[in-house]
């Protein structure tokens, strides 16, 4: 109680979130990485006359060197080359699965939102029920039914990832339905289908596109996890999950480079995708700013 | 108050039962729709030599050709008495397989979850408090990178560094060599898998706590507390953190599916004797009795977690309308 003299408050640390730095800081590096990855993945297989399955036991298990930048795996295959092919496969699977799940999700969400009533309630309870099953487990069940293959993996991802899109589309449709322009269209004699396709869906389209891009990293991740467990693509195919799975054995004998490169590439690519789509989300929906500070 | 919480719990349970029924039935239909025949699987190549009478006898005994609904009903009737059928891949009753392994998974998951929570609260609070400094950037940047990294890759990296290179900790299983299972041995073997599970789950918690704290710094009661001259650490822990932790409770429930997924992968990397190995074996061998039971169980856990999160939320925040 002795110290009653007034002191100026120390510089406050408790401040509200400072305005995020210009989105350019996130967009430019992300976009640059994405363009680079896309170019590599698309152009390299066309230009380079090398086979990513080429086995050369003479150079097996070599650490990174000038000839093999990321080293070679236990069969003497070049890790860098396999990474490029693996990323190509993973991104293709991710994109295709994300698009399919967006289509399914949009259909279900639009149906629930426009029909409404008990139909909506039942449909959404079904969505809730599916959402309660852990993604990867459900994915594993689907792969088990269809036997591991590229198609099985894509279907497995699509069937587990459409829920988010369905929820977004439904809530958007429900809020759009109360807008005057929809009333105007109905008064003007537009059919349900016309209202849906000409007035509702075009207005939901940006949200759907955004949800689809945000789904791509998830889909890639899902594919990688399935492949890692041995339930994904066939073992010889180059995919990030398969490569890391193969590298597990070599890790015990000191071969760190076989799992390092595919993992790092995957992280960089996913960060770039979510970085770029994050900027887009902030522009679409300024209230929910993700506040990235890196 | 307690009565309305009881009502909430009852309503949620009333939702959980049909969900579990629907999920298990859907799994059943999926299993039936697969081109896979359990009788053929049982015989393997020997089916060529087996007499048609014997095959027919087995089909009859197993009820393979009965309608799906009848089979499902039979399964359900046995399931409520605790008999989940036999696992084809592990040659054991399913309930035994789960009983042997569940304890290990629960141990790993609960320890990992607790550690992730602590990390999330500590680092999240710290990052919000020191917002904008290099420390904040380091924490948030690290979180985004970890969010993007596959769990099993992080696991392998940790395994390589701490178990293989530095040799500080054992890298797999729960015992070394032929040692009997002991509390001390298990504790040492737990460190790496628990740590990996925790750091793979922590980023969401860290970012969430940080974001909510930053928002609560602008709220009147926090500004008021600061204006009265309370030191920063008291304002953060006593005023800001309290209100911003409410939504955190819901997040706990929502993160459960991810936690189970993470545990599945971490167990695989560290050869943990939990349910992961059984799940993968079951999937590779199309062992639906086991796979289905595991999936239904995981769903039940998720539903229970959501219920718990809701109850905790309504206990912590009396404003929440329980019947809403």
Image (cartoon, coloured by chain):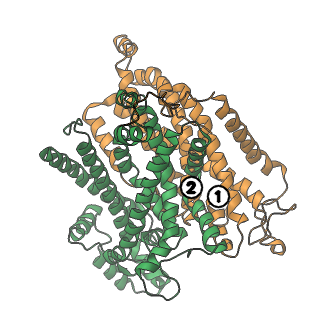
Chain colours: A orange, B green
Chain of the residue that carries numbered disc 2 in the rendered image: A
CB under 8 Å between discs 1 and 2: yes
Q: Total of numbered circles in the picture? A: 2
Residue lying at the far front of the rendered structure: A2
Q: CA distance from mark 1 to mark 2?
A: 9 Å
Marks 1 and 2 belong to one chain = yes
Residue at the spot x=49%, y=74% of the render? B189
- Residue A240 marker: 1
Indicate the quadrant where residue B217 lies: top left
Q: Nearer the viewer, residue A250 or A106?
A: A250
Residue at the spot x=53%, y=54% of the render? A222
Looking at the picture, how far across and down is residue B20, in whole percent? 28, 56
- Above or below: residue B157 compared with residue B212: below
- Above or below: residue B204 compared with residue B177: above
Helix, strand or loop at mark 1: helix
Please indicate whether residue B169 sits to the left or right of residue B84 in the image: right
- Residue B95 marker: none
Dot 2 corresponds to which residue? A223
């Amino acid at each position: 109680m002795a110290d009653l003299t007034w002191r100026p408050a120390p510089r406050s640390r408790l401040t509200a979130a400072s305005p995020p730095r210009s989105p350019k800081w996130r967009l430019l590096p992300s976009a640059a990485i994405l363009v680079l990855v896309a170019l590599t993945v698309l152009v390299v297989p066309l230009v380079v006359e090398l086979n990513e399955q080429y086995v050369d036991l003479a150079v097996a298990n070599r650490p990174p060197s000038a000839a093999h930048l990321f080293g070679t795996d236990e069969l003497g295959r070049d890790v860098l080359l396999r990474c490029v092919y693996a990323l190509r496969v993973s991104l293709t699977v991710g994109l295709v699965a994300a698009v399919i799940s967006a289509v399914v999700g949009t259909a279900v969400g639009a149906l629930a939102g426009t029909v409404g009533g008990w139909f909506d309630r039942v449909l959404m309870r079904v969505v809730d029920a599916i959402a309660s099953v852990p993604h990867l487990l459900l994915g594993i069940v689907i792969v088990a039914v269809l036997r591991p293959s590229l198609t099985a993996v894509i279907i497995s991802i699509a069937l587990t990832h459409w829920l988010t899109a369905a929820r977004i589309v439904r809530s958007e449709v429900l809020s759009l339905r109360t807008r005057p322009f929809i009333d105007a269209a109905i008064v003007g004699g537009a059919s349900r289908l016309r209202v849906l396709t000409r007035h509702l869906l075009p207005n939901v389209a940006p949200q759907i596109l955004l949800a689809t891009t945000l789904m791509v990293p998830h889909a890639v991740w899902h594919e990688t996890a399935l492949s890692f467990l041995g339930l994904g693509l066939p073992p010889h195919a180059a995919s990030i999950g398969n490569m890391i799975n193969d590298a597990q054995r070599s890790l015990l004998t000191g071969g760190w480079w076989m799992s390092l490169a595919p993992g790092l590439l995957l992280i960089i690519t996913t960060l770039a995708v979510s970085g770029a789509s994050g900027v887009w989300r902030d522009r679409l929906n300024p209230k929910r700013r993700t506040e990235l500070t890196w | 108050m307690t009565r309305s919480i009881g009502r909430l719990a009852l309503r949620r349970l009333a939702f959980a039962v049909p969900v579990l029924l629907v999920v298990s039935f859907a799994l059943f239909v999926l299993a039936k729709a697969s081109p896979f025949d359990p009788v053929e699987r049982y015989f393997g190549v020997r089916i060529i030599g087996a007499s048609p009478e014997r095959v027919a006898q087995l089909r009859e005994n197993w009820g393979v050709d009965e309608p799906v609904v009848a089979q499902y009903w039979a399964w359900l009737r046995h399931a409520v008495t605790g008999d989940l059928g036999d696992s084809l891949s592990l040659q054991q009753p399913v309930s035994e397989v789960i009983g042997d392994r569940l304890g290990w998974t629960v141990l790993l998951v609960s320890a990992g979850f607790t550690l992730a929570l602590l990390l999330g609260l500590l680092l999240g609070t710290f990052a919000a408090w020191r917002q904008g400094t290099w420390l904040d950037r380091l924490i948030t940047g690290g979180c985004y990178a970890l969010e993007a990294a596959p769990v099993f890759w992080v696991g392998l990296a940790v395994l390589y560094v701490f178990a293989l290179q530095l040799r500080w900790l054992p890298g797999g299983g729960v015992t070394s060599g032929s040692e009997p299972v002991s509390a001390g041995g298990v504790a040492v073997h737990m460190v790496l898998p628990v740590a990996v599970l925790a750091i793979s789950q922590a980023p969401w918690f860290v970012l969430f706590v940080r974001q909510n704290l930053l928002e609560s710094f602008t709220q009147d009661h926090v500004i008021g507390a600061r204006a009265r001259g309370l030191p920063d650490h008291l304002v953060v822990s006593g005023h800001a953190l309290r209100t911003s932790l409410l939504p955190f409770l819901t997040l706990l429930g929502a993160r459960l599916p991810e936690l189970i997924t993470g545990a599945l992968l971490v167990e695989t990397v560290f050869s943990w004797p939990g349910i992961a190995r059984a799940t993968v074996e079951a999937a590779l061998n199309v062992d639906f009795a086991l796979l289905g039971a595991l999936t239904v169980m995981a769903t039940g856990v998720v539903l229970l977690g959501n219920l718990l999160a809701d109850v905790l939320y309504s206990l912590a925040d009396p404003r929440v309308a329980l019947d809403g």
